[in-house]
Image (tube, rainbow, N blue to C red):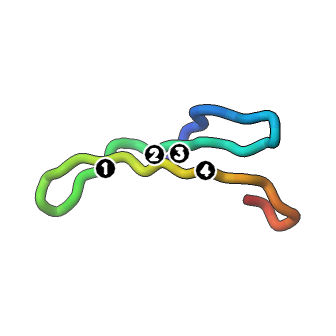
């Protein structure tokens, strides 16, 4: 699942994921920058 962190005036979104674990036990989150287009993001 992803959650919205920030939305900028040009409609760019910053979103982040739930905490995930790698096979070695390290935890991480995924951060994405999304901008709307004619075919979604």
Q: Position of residue 41 (x, y in %)?
A: 73, 59
Q: CA distance from mark 2 to mark 1?
A: 8 Å
Q: Position of residue 20 (x, y in %)?
A: 31, 50
Q: CA distance from mark 3 to mark 2?
A: 4 Å
Q: Pointer 1: what residue?
A: 20
Reading the chain from its start, which is encountered first: label 1 or label 4? Answer: 1
Q: Pointer 2: what residue?
A: 17
Q: Pointer 3: what residue?
A: 2
SS at badge 2? strand
Q: Are marks 3 and 4 in contact (CB under 8 Å)?
A: no
| Front in this rendered view, residue 34 or 21 | 34
Q: CA distance from mark 2 to mark 4?
A: 12 Å
Left or right side of 29 for 23: left
Left or right side of 33 for 19: left
Q: Are marks 2 and 1 in contact (CB under 8 Å)?
A: yes
Q: Are marks 3 and 1 in contact (CB under 8 Å)?
A: no
Q: Pointer 4: what residue?
A: 33
Q: Position of residue 2 (x, y in %)?
A: 53, 45
**Residue in view at x 60 percent, y 36 percent:** 4
Q: Are marks 1 and 4 in contact (CB under 8 Å)?
A: no
Reading the chain from its start, which is encountered first: label 3 or label 4? Answer: 3
Reading the chain from its start, which is encountered first: label 3 or label 2? Answer: 3
Asked where in the image residue 11 lies, by quadrant, the reply is top right
Asked where in the image residue 13 lies, by quadrant, the reply is top right
Q: CA distance from mark 3 to mark 1?
A: 12 Å
| Front in this rendered view, residue 9 or 24 | 9
């Amino acid at each position: 699942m992803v959650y919205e962190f920030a939305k900028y005036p040009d409609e760019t979104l910053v979103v982040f994921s739930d905490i995930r674990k790698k096979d070695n036990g390290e935890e991480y989150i995924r951060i994405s920058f999304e901008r709307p287009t004619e075919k979604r993001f």
